[in-house]
Amino acid sequence: MADPTKQSFTPEDSIAPVEMNGLHGFISKFTVLKGAQRELWLTFLIKFLLYTAYSITNKTMVLWLSKDLGFSDQAAGALVGWFWAPSMTVFTLLAGSLTDAIGLRRTFFLGVGICTIARSVMAVTTIPWLALACGVLPLAVGEALGTPVLLAATRRYSTIRQRSMSFSIIYMIMNIGYVTAGWIFDYIRKLDLHFNFFGLDPTPHQQLFLVSLAFEILIFPAIYFLRRDEDSATFSAHAQRAGNFVARIAATVQQSAADTLHLFRRLFGQSAFFRILVFFLLIGFLKAIFLQMDYVFPKFGDRELGLHAPVGKLANINAILIILLVPTIGALTQRFAAYRMVIIGGAICAAGVFIMALPTQWFVSAANSAVGQWLGHGYLGLQGSVHPYYIMAALYLAVFSVGEAFYSPRVYEYAAAIAPKGQEASYGALAYLPFLVGKLLVGTSGWILATFCPATGPRRSGTMWLIFALAASIAPIGLLVFRRYIRVPEADRQDL
């Protein structure tokens, strides 16, 4: 770990922030970043570029696997849910120690370098084994390196007074990246360009990978201007205890894996561990529905709404609303217990998914209304009539976003609240489990898609969405029914 004495320190770090009320106090929460280090602004820029590139790739993945590489719905779903997405989660768990070992800047360069090579391969080849071995798998490693590094960089380059606002901005930038990616995804597919570049005739999906590659390359100059002194101190300290660079990385990965196993062995004997484990397993059903937007919605949109349907802009409804709702709902519900808010949020999320299972004829009048016409022609840029599924999807995403704003931030709070003293970090590390469970569950979506919403033949998409809605309902129902066994008293919280 980096020497704390080498980290930047300013006089304001030693002074407790003074609370100010009224408009001046509200404005001061934003102006606190005035005079922030250059590295903090570069971290914000890197976050935007990384997440835009990642989101473009994520939305494109299942379509590319099926249409360019020839995988069936079932195989594409399994590759994404059981290979690509879980690999990122596993490598992310190992990346934190690697960052401590070789420093922020070197880890940034390593991760972005791997992603650049991987995206280049995915943009030029249609050979399945080559695309998977030299594209998809390395990309999972490179993407995983970025997550803990960005969090560490935000903490390192911000002062104590700036830290809370810095992490809020990081969260906002992530969603701005998602919105940008959704717009690019729709725009490139709508253009449907056909061109030859040095013998390469890229498909629309490879063109999207090329765009994500361009965003990735733009990260290099930003990393270059990050300060080097802390990295040098960290690297020198570890260099004295290890051999060459590759050996250091191998040793660090081995140690990270051992630390992770030790963590689970240490927690295994605690009753609270089994409760939080069941809690996170149930939350995984909600995360699976969130992941459907990238891994199911593109194919569903092409098949039910027409080729190159603007599903990216539809998905943006979620990101836009989350930016607006999370701080507001968080402020209004902060006195309530996290467990209760998770149940309420999960129930709202599940209710939103049921909208997609309703008969489409119920929403014909809404599609023809002024609001429906604005959504279709004004926001989505459609030509001709507006399919009822657009209205249904917009309502589903709006309701789902409200539920997500209730439950998602409180999941991590609950893990921290019930952790035994001194083990907050260990329990916080378990917060990766819901996404891992969700990714494993979403691996089955290919079979559901092929059965109820196939590329050719009769479709029963309402039944498909009913299955997804029932799966989402497992989370709030399970949390409610088994709360007597799962719930642990939260520190400094009343049972509200």
Image (cartoon, grey):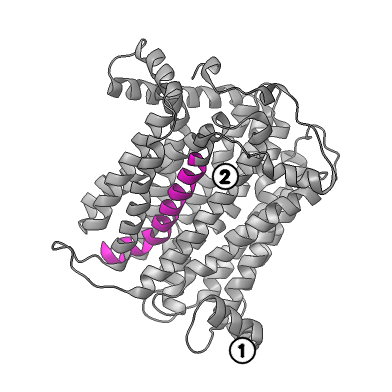
79 to the left or right of 148? left
Mark 2 to mark 1: distance in Å?
39 Å
**What residue appears at the point 53 percent right and 46 percent down from the top-left corner?**
435
Most common SS among magenta residues: helix
- The residues colored magenta run 42-70
Rendering quarter of residue 288: bottom right
Rendering quarter of residue 443: bottom left
Q: Can residue 411 be found in the magenta stretch?
A: no
**What residue appears at the point 40 percent right and 58 percent down from the top-left corner?**
77
Which numbered circle lies on residue 170? 2
Which numbered circle lies on residue 368? 1
Rendering quarter of residue 29: top right
* Residue 177 x, y percent position in the rendering: 50, 54
* Residue density around tag 1, few if under 14, some if 14–19, many if 20 or more, within 10 Å: some
Q: Which residue occupies the extreme top position in the image?
A: 240
Q: Considering the image in quadrants, where does the C terminus appear?
A: top right
Mark 1 secondary-structure assignment:
helix
